[in-house]
Amino acid sequence: MQKDSGDIYQQYRNLAGKKVSFIIFLFFILLGVALIAISVGASSMSPLDSLAALFTDSGTAHAIVWKLRLPRIVMAILVGSGLGFAGTIFQAVLRNPLASPYTLGIASGAGFGAVVAIVFGAGFSAEYLIAGNAFFFALLTSFLILGISGQRSSTTETMILAGIAVMFFFSSLSSLFQYMGSMEQVHEIVFWFFGSLSKAGWKEIGMTADMVLLPSTFLLKLSWDFNLLSAGDESAKAVGVNVKGVRLTGIILASLITAGVICFTGVIGFIGLVSPHISRMIIGGDHRFLLPASALVGAVIVLAADTAGRTIWAPQIIPIGIVTSFIGVPFFFYLLIKRTKEYW
Amino acid sequence: MGITVIRLDFYKMHRLKQDIEILGRILQKEKQAGQLIDWYREKMEFIKERLKPGCKPPDVYMENYSDYHSVGPGSGADEMCALSGGHNISSDFAIPYPEVTPEWVLTKNPEIIIKAVSFCNCYAMTGTNKLEGARKKILKRPAWDNIRAVREGKVYVMAGDIWTGPTAVVGICYMAKWFYPDFFNDLDPEKIHKEYLEKFQRVSYRGTYVYPYNF
């Protein structure tokens, strides 16, 4: 008897150990990609010189590495991990594999906010007019969805459906304003929807970091509740989970993360949907491990995509929003075909 | 149905004369179209003549309305740069409106930066505040103090009104003066703009279109 339970503990430790190793493995992958990202760029510096420039404190090489490449890398990591993390939360609290910042309409809401800023009253006077608007509309969208789904006995399906409806609604509104806008404005809108990491400096990074790290730290503490939610609302309630409260907290905080990320970068698609799935296929659905893993997977994809996007066709950039899908989709398909057991 | 459709660009400089001619014929205003073409040709030839004596074109970074979006071949602004005697650093790109990294601009180290801005209506705008603000943002971009144009203050902001399109000739005059201040002492872009608005558009001249203006 004693021996048996010892075995079970041992097995559990082995399993948890495997998951932790995967997370550590992802961390080193991210570090590797970051090292590559810091050593490539338009300037003629060799990769080694670039790395050496990290330890200088003046000069052009220092400026390139510290003021241009490093902020870009940090922003890519924040964006990727934020979207991966938020996507996992949405999928957990709505118990739906299709939930993501996009299918819930939050990205379209942010996009619409940016369009409003660009077409009506975009000026240089207010420094964060576009970003502020995008942020505000992203949050507004999530409250709208919460409001709509709160009207009837709110099942998770109503929320997804409401989100998709809201997505179409905001896309149409954006198209309408785009149609009304001048050529210059249409130009700017199109590029905003491509997404870009060029515009983020250290100041923007600080703001995004707050909006990604604080909510995620809090949400990570609710991991057990998310695990219990996956067994269904009734079972979760039966073991004492405040289902409504957890769902509300999850949606609001994940929306905050999403808004904080995309307001400075524009639309970077697909990460929020696919990072949780990739991680779930590999390490399963325990959110204590799944959340950090999804964040890391998202960070690796975005950083790799941006580095590829600014290298492959240099000096032209392939916008990040386009490359993420090119890199993520084939990998996702590969895992979908290879997986042996039901993972969701 | 056999409906004939005509498409006019009005943003490609090399087709501008032809576009005006065709529109003149369609509207049966050939005389006015001819006048506009002559006026246009006169200004362009003036600049071309002055540029002849083997001057070295300055490296110019031209930025479109969206930050870090440059102009490549096939865009109106790329043609404008060449016509005013500048060398657009992204003129050998593969696409007309490419996004570039700030690092690439820094590496190219252009002598002059020209940024297009749009505030819906610069014709109704008084004062230079908005254009000044746009310029300041470029000067403050991270690490760009390493670029020659920024160090020497040769960063100019141009309103979309005179950036490509039929009024591009005004923009070209400004650019020619920025590129070669000594060659074009007697060229007054504001006067040319006034002429265009009063003679061909029949509205009075006002608004703010470039910053800084002083040469």
Image (spheres, coloured by chain):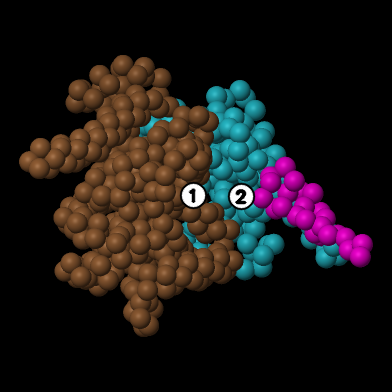
Image height check: is B158 above or below A42?
Answer: below
Q: Are marks 2 and 1 on the same chain?
A: no
Residue B130 location in percent, x, y? Answer: 39, 58
Q: Find out whether residue B17 is within the magenta segment.
A: yes
Q: Secondary structure at mark 1?
A: helix
Q: Which residue is mark 2?
A: B164
- How packed is label 1: few (under 14 Cα within 10 Å), some, or many (20 or more)? some
Give the extent of the magenta segment.
Answer: B1-25
| Chain letter of disc 1 in the image | A
The chain whose colour is brown is A
At label 1, which amino acid type do we have?
Phe
Residue under the point 31% across and 21% down: A50
Q: Which residue is mark 1?
A: A194
Specify the quadrant that holds the N terminus of chain A: top left
Q: Depth check: B91 or A237 in front?
A: A237
Does A240 sit left or right of B204 as displayed?
left
